[in-house]
Amino acid sequence: MNKYKILFIVFVSLLGLKNSSAQQVYSSQFYSMPIYLNPALTGSSDYNIRSGVNYRNQWNSVSTPFVSQSAYIDGKLAFPYLGASWLGIGGVIFNDKAGTGGLKTNQLMLTTSLNKSLNKGNTLFFHGGIGIELVNKSVDYHKLVFGDQWDGDFFNNPTGELPKTQSLFYLDISLGGAFTYFRGNTRYFFGTSVAHINQPSESFYAITNNLKRSYNFHGGLETKLSPKIYIKPEFLYKSEYLATELMLGANCAMSTGKKGVILHYGLWYRNKEDIIPTVGVQKNRFKFIMSYDIDVSALQLTSASKGGLEISLTYNYNYSNPRNVKRLERKRKAKKIGDKAISCPKFTNED
């Protein structure tokens, strides 16, 4: 059995793990947190080091806002015995606060990946990765009203329904696979990831509540429309417990003529829920993107069509096109994160 068949079997096996799941993070800029979307994307960028922060504020007009913040960093590790391949390592810190009960989620996730060139021309790559995260969830019971408190003055009527604990911890494991293909001035990519592989128990009560598996499909392409304009259409399909989500859209990058300054703009659509315009600016290694969800769902009368504000800031360091991995290895310039890569034309303006 050759290596292509083995990789194909691994990729299809990930597809076969599908089994609906509990809700994960709700984000419109999924492309700004690539290693959280899929651990296989760890170290799969055009840079030796990539990092970013993300902030989202949602449902301000309906209830207590749902606020989330996250930060990530990932990079490449190349070794002589890997040939035209490299390892990716990364980490994510995530915090989320939801609703009037002060439900908080804190996550620390470590990811690693193998990025394998599949042909001599370095035009086809396979990426396989794993993520291991420590999750803490907590809630403030004093901000909640339970069913047995509605018979009287619930402010002074203590409940008998208090859960066993206000804070819990568990380990969560995710797997992912992806392919990248270069053809001319276009890059094609497709991937899938599965969260809650180990189906950990998540319950504040003395019962077992195993999380079902969550499934992501994502993909798209990036191409040059003109010497100054790149376009990157993408999609994301999520399957979770009794729920699915489809996002479609594209971001564009346009050079302004000023050294190092690039404008970003785009438009996205979340199926039957939101229209999401994006704007941003890039200056050298830093890129700032802002998006806003315009609610078009059945809740728009209540929300006044307001959804969520999301902003991201990314920083890329040390350009290193994956198509030049062999060249970098021969020159011994990509042995570890931070080594200076050989100067070469930039292929992408990646999100």
Image (cartoon, helix red, strand yellow):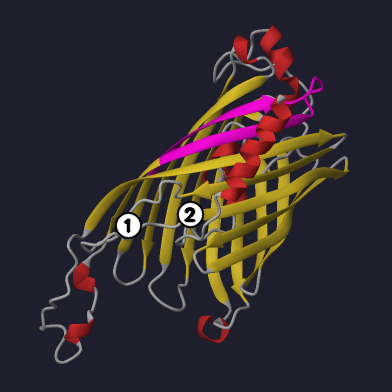
From the viewer's side, name the closer residue of 58 and 256. Answer: 58
Q: Are marks 2 and 1 in contact (CB under 8 Å)?
A: no
Instruction: Check disc 2 and report its element: helix, strand or loop.
Output: loop
Instruction: Report the magenta residues as a range.
Output: 108-132
Q: Residue lying at the far top in this picture: please name it.
A: 331
Task: Identify the residue at the far bottom of this view.
Answer: 151
Q: Is residue 147 left or right of residue 190?
A: left
Q: Amino acid at mark 1?
A: Glu
Residue tagged 1: 202
Q: Residue at x 67, y 12 (%)?
A: 329
328 vs 246: above or below: above
- Residue type at the position of mark 2: Arg
Magenta span: predominant SS is strand
In the rendered image, residue 177, in percent from the top left (x then y), is placed at 61, 39
Left or right, 83 with respect to 106, comes to right
Point out which mark residue 213 bears. 2
Give x and y (percent) for residue 71. Answer: 46, 43
Observer-nearest residue: 123 or 289? 123
Q: Position of residue 192 (x, y in %)?
A: 62, 47
| Front one among 171 and 291 | 171
Residue 28 location, quadrant: bottom right
Could one spot residue 194 in this view of the protein?
yes
Which mark is on residue 221? Answer: none
Q: Nearer the viewer, residue 288 or 36?
A: 36
Split into 4 quadrants, where in the image is the N terminus? top right
